[in-house]
Each structure stands twice: as structure tokens, then as C-alpha cells.
Amino acid sequence: MSEKEISNVNQYFFNLITMFASSAWCQLGKIQDPVDGKIKKDLKGAQITIDMLLMLRDKTKGNLTKNEEEILASAISDLQINYADEVSKCKVC
């Protein structure tokens, strides 16, 4: 998505999606925890965070711009794919 398209998105909404997605990426062990710099996995927490994004999508249906819908859908899709990948790697989850 181009800068112009992102600039047409409500910045509070964009920041909220980014906050949830960053949290989920940390919980999936894909990026470092910003507090201690360590990589940790919390797949249950990641699933809850993804579920929160799904709930947000459902509750805002019909009230988002096309760009906002695309940002939210992309975040959810990317996280779900990576969640499934991590679960398939995990033997004791």
C-alpha cells in the first residue's frame, strides 16, 4: 500500500491495527519483545490477539474505508498464516 493510500486511512485505526499486529508477531516469536529484546512464543496469546482483530473486523463491518478494510484483512491473513505455521512446528502446545 502506498503512502498516499495509508494517508487516507484514519491514523488511530491504523495505529490500533499495528499495535495488535505487533503484539501478535511478538507472541508468535517472529520479532523481539520490545521490553526485554528476547524472542518468546505465546501461541495462546497470539490466537487471542488474532481473535481480537477478527472481532474488530466483524464489529466495524460497513464502517471502514476500502483501504482500512484492506489493511485489517492483510494483517489478519498474514498473522493467521504464520500462526498456522508455528502451530504445525510445535509438538507440545
Image (tube, helix red, strand yellow):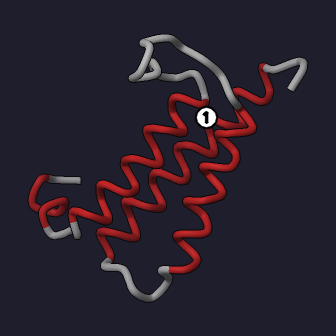
> Which one is in front, 18 or 35?
35
The amino acid marked with disc number 1 is: Asn
Give the number of marks: 1
Answer above or below: position of 57 versus 18: below
Measuring 45% from the left and 18% from the top, which residue is drawn there? Answer: 32
Q: Residue 10: percent from the left, percent from the top?
A: 22, 69
Secondary structure beneath dot 1 equals helix
Answer above or below: position of 77 versus 69: above
Answer above or below: position of 79 versus 14: above
The quadrant in which residue 84 appears is top right
Residue furthest to the right in view is 92
Q: For the C terminus, which image quadrant?
A: top right
Measuring 44% from the left and 14% from the top, which residue is drawn there? Answer: 36
Measuring 36% from the left and 48% from the top, which residue is drawn there? Answer: 18
Q: Is residue 86 left or right of residue 63?
A: right
* Residue tagged 1: 82
Measuring 50% from the left and 11% from the top, which residue is drawn there? Answer: 38
Q: Is residue 15 left or right of residue 21?
A: left
